[in-house]
Image (cartoon, rainbow, N blue to C red):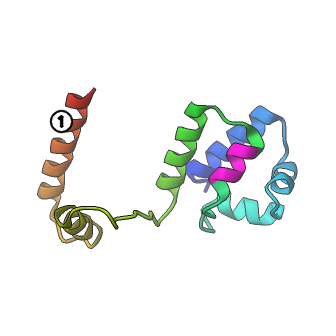
């Protein structure tokens, strides 16, 4: 089953007129490896976004969609917490280690969404 990232790769490929084989060649990988990434059987390489952006001259909107699709399709998200305050580090730790119940998570999401709305 294709991931969100895989679906977006197909859109990029279709819009460019490339075949899967041509896209794989442009990205310097085998067609079978590209296929396993699209289907979620392999992790998305970190450099994949940069390769796609450089190779296919994506718009700013396409870049955002690409990064969102990568995050949604990846089981791992890397966050640099080096310069974050201790409270923020603790919150990230608690969320990622499933230390929070669903009610607390729902409340946090409401607060975050409210703050986002205020910033617009």
Residue at left 82%, top 60%? 28
User: Foreground residue, 41 or 56?
Assistant: 56
Mark 1 lies on a secondary structure that is helix
Q: Residue at x 62, y 67 (%)?
A: 41
Q: Quadrant of residue 54?
A: top right
Inspect the magenta stretch and tell me whether residue 89 lies in it: no
For residue 44, side relative to residue 96 (left or right)? right
For the image, the number of numbered tags is 1
Residue 107 falls left or right of residue 80: left
Residue 85: % across, % down: 21, 62
In the rendered view, tell whether residue 104 sits above or below residue 9.
below
Judge whether 86 appears above or below 25 on screen.
below
Quadrant (top left, top right, bottom left, bottom right) of the C terminus: top left
Q: Give above or below for 47 relative to 13.
A: below
Magenta range is: 49-54
Q: Residue at the top extreme? A: 120
Please tell me which residue is depicted at 66% across the width and 56% down the height of the picture.
48
Residue assigned mark 1: 114
Is 51 inside the magenta-drawn segment? yes
Q: Residue at x 86, y 56 (%)?
A: 25
Residue 112 x, y percent position in the rendering = 21, 43
Q: Nearer the viewer, residue 48 or 31?
A: 48
Chief secondary structure of the magenta portion: helix
Q: Quadrant of residue 79?
A: bottom left
Residue 78, given in percent of the width and then of the height, sits at 44, 65
């Amino acid at each position: 089953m294709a991931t969100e990232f895989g679906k977006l790769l197909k859109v990029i490929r279709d819009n460019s007129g490339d075949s899967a084989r041509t896209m794989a060649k442009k990205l310097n990988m085998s067609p079978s490896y590209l296929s396993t990434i699209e289907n979620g059987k392999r992790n998305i390489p970190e450099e994949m976004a940069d390769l796609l952006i450089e190779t296919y001259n994506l718009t700013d909107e396409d870049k955002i969609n690409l990064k969102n699709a990568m995050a949604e399709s990846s089981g791992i998200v890397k966050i640099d917490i080096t310069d974050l305050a201790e409270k923020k580090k603790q919150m990230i730790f608690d969320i990622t280690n499933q230390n929070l119940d669903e009610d607390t998570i729902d409340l946090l999401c409401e607060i975050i969404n409210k703050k986002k709305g205020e910033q617009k």
